[in-house]
Structure formats: C-alpha cells, structure tokens
Image (cartoon, rainbow, N blue to C red):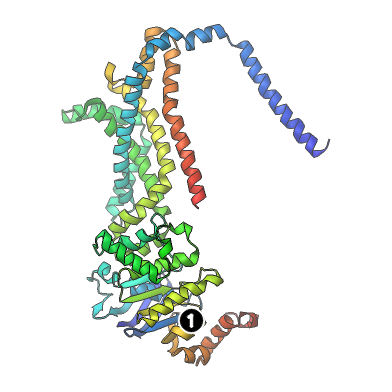
Amino acid sequence: MIEIRDLHKSFGELEVLKGIDLRVAQAEAVCVIGPSGSGKSTLLRCINLLETPSSGRVAIGDVEVTDPDVDIDAIRRRIGMVFQQFNLFPHLTVTENVTIAQRRVLRRDKAEAERVAAANLERVGLSDKSGAYPAQLSGGQQQRAAIARALAMGPELMLFDEPTSSLDPEIVGDVLAVMRGLAQDGMTMIVVTHEMNFAREVADRVVFMDGGVIVEQGAAEQVIDNPAHERTRKFLTRVLRPAAAELADLP
Amino acid sequence: MTRRQRARAIRVAQYLILLAAAGAFAALADWGRIGDAFFDVDVIHDLFPEVITVALKNTVLYTLCAFAFGLLLGLVIALMRLSPVTAYRALATVYIEFFRGVPALLVLIGFGYGIPIALNTELPGGILGTITVALGLVAAAYMAETFRAGIQAVPRGQMEAARSLGMSHARAMVSIVIPQAFRIILPPLTNELILLTKDSSLVYLLGVTLPTRELAKFGRDSLNQYVSMTPILIAGLAYLLITVPLGYVVRRLEAQQAKAR
C-alpha cells in the first residue's frame, strides 16, 4: 500500500534520512523504533509531506505523493496523523475538533459530521467529553480525542508520531488500548514509539532506525528479542533496562 | 535597629514625604481661582447635552470607523507580511515602516487637503470618510504588526494538524490559526483602540463644523466661548469615560489569558 524508495531528507547541512526503503502492506501495523535523532519522525512526516523529501519517492496506493503536481490536500485526507503534542485545536470543543475538517474539507453537513464524531468519540471512549475544551482534558484524553479527529476523516492509513511520549506513565495504557483496537480492526498504521511492549504485542513488523538508515526490520520477537545487529542490541538494552546501562555504553 | 524596624521606619518616611508634598500643594494653590476656572457650574450646565450628544458621539463614531477600517487593512497587511511572495512581504514592510514612522497629523493633512488637490475630488463620506481612511491607514500599520506577532505566536503544530487533516493553507489560516491569534492579540488590540480614541482629536485639522465636532474641538471652542477651563476638564473626563472601561477590559482579558495558560 505504501512504498518508499531511496528517501533522502536534509535540513541544511544535516542529512537526517540517508536512503530509506520501506514497504507497508494493507492492514499491516508497523512500529518504528530507534534512538532520538535517528530520523523516525522525519520519515513519518515525509509520508504526508509535512516535510518535503530532498529526493526519493513515496507512493500511497497508486498515487505518487512526491509528484510535484499532486494535490497534497487530497492525499492528506486519506492519511490520519497523530502527534506527540496532540495538537488539538484549543479554541474548539472536542466535538468541534472532530467535525471541523469533516465539514470544511469533506463538506459533510453538520448533522452527518456530528454523527461521525459521536461514533468515533465512542470508539476512543470519550463520549462524555464531547462538549469539553481540550484544556479541560487530561493528556491521555486529549490524545484519544486527537485520534478520533483523525479517524473521523475515514483515513486509509494512520501515522502515529510518538503518541504516548508526552503522557504520564499511568495513562499511556488508555491510548495504547485504542491503538491496539485500531490494529485489530485492520487499520494500516505506522507507529513511531518507544513502547517496546506495545510493539511486541501489536506490530506485524518492527523497523529499527539509527543514523538516518533502517538498520534492521522483521517480526517483533525477532527484532526486539533477538536482534541481529549490535546497534539494535545496544539501543534495546538502554530502553528495556535503563538502570543497567553503563556510562561506557552511552553514545 | 532590627531589619524589621528599619523597614517600618522607611515606609513611614515615604508616607510623610507624600503628605508633605500634598500639604505644600494645598497651601500654595489658590483654591478660589481654581474653582472658578475649572468647576464653573453654570458653564457645566451649558455644555450639556451637546458634550454627549454631539462631541462624545462623534469621538466614538470617528474612532470606531477608523478602527474597523484599520482592523481589516491591518489583517491583510499582516498576511502579506507573512506571505511566501517576496514582493508582498516587501510592500507590507514598506507600508508599515511608512505609516508607523509618519505622524498621524501629517497623514490626515495629506488626505484632507492633498487628495482633493491631487485628484480634484474629495474622499466620499466627507469628514467621517476622510478620518476613517487617514487614521485607519495609520492604525493598520500598528495592527498589522500586532496581527503578525499573534499569528506567529500560535504553535506550529496547529497549522500542521490542520494541514494533516487535508485543509489548505488558507483554510487552516481562517479556521484554526487566525481565531487563536485573535485571542492572543485582543489586549494589545484594545490598547490600539484607546490610542485611536485620542488620535481622533486630530480631526480638527480638517475644519469641522458644529455638528461634526468631537470632544477635543468641542472643549477648545467652549474654552474660547466661556473663557473658562471648565470645558477642557469636562472633555477630559468624557475621554476617560471611554478609555477607563477599555483599560478595565484589557486587564480582564489579560487575567483570563493568564488563567487559561
């Protein structure tokens, strides 16, 4: 469904992506792991052109995203994105957050948009918060509202950019449960995450990135529990057993 | 002396200085003359109701019209200033630098006398039209900078979230960014309204008639008529009638924003 070929991205002198090749099939859930600065988020943001790739090609279905003549707004409608900082619209209620793009972009009428919003808020367990403003919600609730906002557009693909990294540990589970449900329903998703247990349990495939390249990829139990590369092993040791890390191991 | 005693002594000394200054002023001032000049009850009686029905009304009218014009133009110029098109950015910068740097008085004269000479026609709307455009042009320069700061204060993630939902840049601006920017800039915008209220006094340059006088001109005319400072005091109080509530609104808005954060 998604095909990324020889993707490069530089910010000025700094080359963040150094030739990424990745294919994601329909209904596949892929988790991207790796140290910060490895280019995971940039890769995700290149898929819906929040960042413009320096070179290479991204195709979704038979539409080439990187074609300069493509209608990027039309493509973004098919791709849901969830951000680390939620990015809910603070001046709108939860329902308005979920309906505004349906109405302004998909041109649904108010009743239809609100019906879709209610269904998706129920799906993420926020039916009782529909009239609240984002500032009145906890971080976990905000992130679930953001997921409902993306789902209301009926996306074929969901991109998650460290969706639980700015949440308190005890509410991470609520958000992960929603994402697990999505994966079980057959949503195609790419998740940048540090949650190894989630990756082990939900991901059809785990991709380990470091230094702007994909170091290795494969089934979760293979990459996480039995990594082939030394870099992967070192990273996983630091993430899974932070107390055991030795100063000498630090990059 | 302990530290607490010293602090106490300093505070007492400060109050004593204030009292001494007030006492000196009260003793030196000629209260009879001040009363006659500033608080002439007969004159006050004569000034009403025109000070409200004509002067205050015109001040509010000129201010609001110029403000509305400046608000719209200011938003357009702010968007030009943030445009990816270099020519628009340059135009907006030149506009802002010019109208922010030139006294409002000169702009008003330029429009009141310059345009009729240059184009052999007057601006439509007479005095009101001229002051709306002239003061609005000046206000727009300040408001454009306020708008720009407000738009840039909205976190980048807001635009990214809107774009990721398939909104065009323009749609995201209108539905997501500008409404949030507007909340941020309400306090400085209200300050601009207060400044404009006072600048509306410049209308006298255009040669106003009796029914088009505003507060400052009304006060000066009455000063000559009654040979009394009382009208100036009344006009000043009438300005405060507008600006003090606005100042209160600004403080309320700022407190609200501090709470929401």
Query: Mark 1 falls on what kind of element?
Result: helix
Can residue A19 be seen here? no
Q: Residue furthest right?
A: B1
> In the image, is residue B83 above or below residue B187?
below
Residue that numbered label 1 is attached to? A198
Can residue B121 be seen here? yes
Image quadrant containing the C terminus of chain A: bottom right
- The chain that hosts pointer 1 is A
Residue at 41% x, 38% y is B190
Q: Would you call the spot at circle 1 few (<14 residues within 10 Å), some (14-19), or many (20 or more)?
A: some
Residue at 32% x, 21% y is B204
Image quadrant containing the N terminus of chain A: bottom left
> In the image, is residue A195 above or below residue B124?
below
Residue closest to the eye, A8 or B52: B52
Give the image quarter of residue A245: bottom right
In this picture, residue A9 sits left or right of residue A105: right
Residue A185 appears at what percent x and percent y? 36, 81
Q: How many marks?
A: 1
Give the image quarter of residue A100: bottom left
Residue B37 appears at what percent x and percent y? 48, 9
